Image: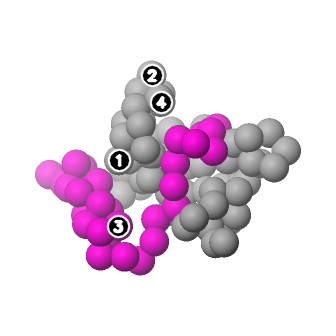
Amino acid sequence: MNKYQNNELVEEMDAIILLNDNYVNEGLFQGYIGVVMENLIAERGFIVADFYNPFTGKSIQPVIEIKQEDFRVISGSVADQKLVKEFKDLFRK
């Protein structure tokens, strides 16, 4: 198994995508992309991630705990690259 099939194997600096709207109160929506800062899944069931505007670099949510079941790792697939573009388009002016 690899990190694209098993979230427990996610690494620091991996890009992740939110799978649901469980973090709306923190300004994060399904489809938002962030970067893993620390993997604490084995110990505590979550990762620590940073979400920021892809154009300005301004933080949307600089340090947030994301549960294992609420994200997946972005791969280099065509489908995932389309999701990255859609996320960036949300912030394009």
Mark 2 touching mark 4, by CB under 8 A?
yes
Separation of residues labelled 2 and 3 (CA atoms): 25 Å
Q: Which amino acid does label 1 sit on?
A: Gly
Residue found at x 37% / y 40%: 30
Please give the label number shown on residue 72: none
In the structure shown, which secondary structural element does the residue marked by tag 3 occupy?
helix
**Residue on which disc 2 sits:** 25
In the structure shown, which secondary structural element does the residue marked by tag 4 occupy?
loop
**Is 28 placed left or right of 38 in the picture?**
left
Is tag 3's residue or tag 1's residue first in the polypeptide sequence?
Answer: 1
Separation of residues labelled 4 and 3 (CA atoms): 21 Å
Report the quarter where the N terminus lies: bottom right
Residue 83 location in percent, x, y?
Answer: 29, 60
Please give the label number shown on residue 23: 4
**Is 36 placed left or right of 33 in the picture?**
right
Q: Residues within 10 Å of mark 2 (few under 14, many from 20)?
A: few
In the figure, residue 79 lies in which quadrant? bottom left
Q: In this view of the protein, can residue 81 be seen by the observer?
A: yes
Residue found at x 23% / y 57%: 86
**Residue on which disc 3 sits:** 80
Is tag 2's residue or tag 3's residue first in the polypeptide sequence?
Answer: 2
Is tag 4's residue or tag 3's residue first in the polypeptide sequence?
Answer: 4
**Residue on which disc 1 sits:** 31
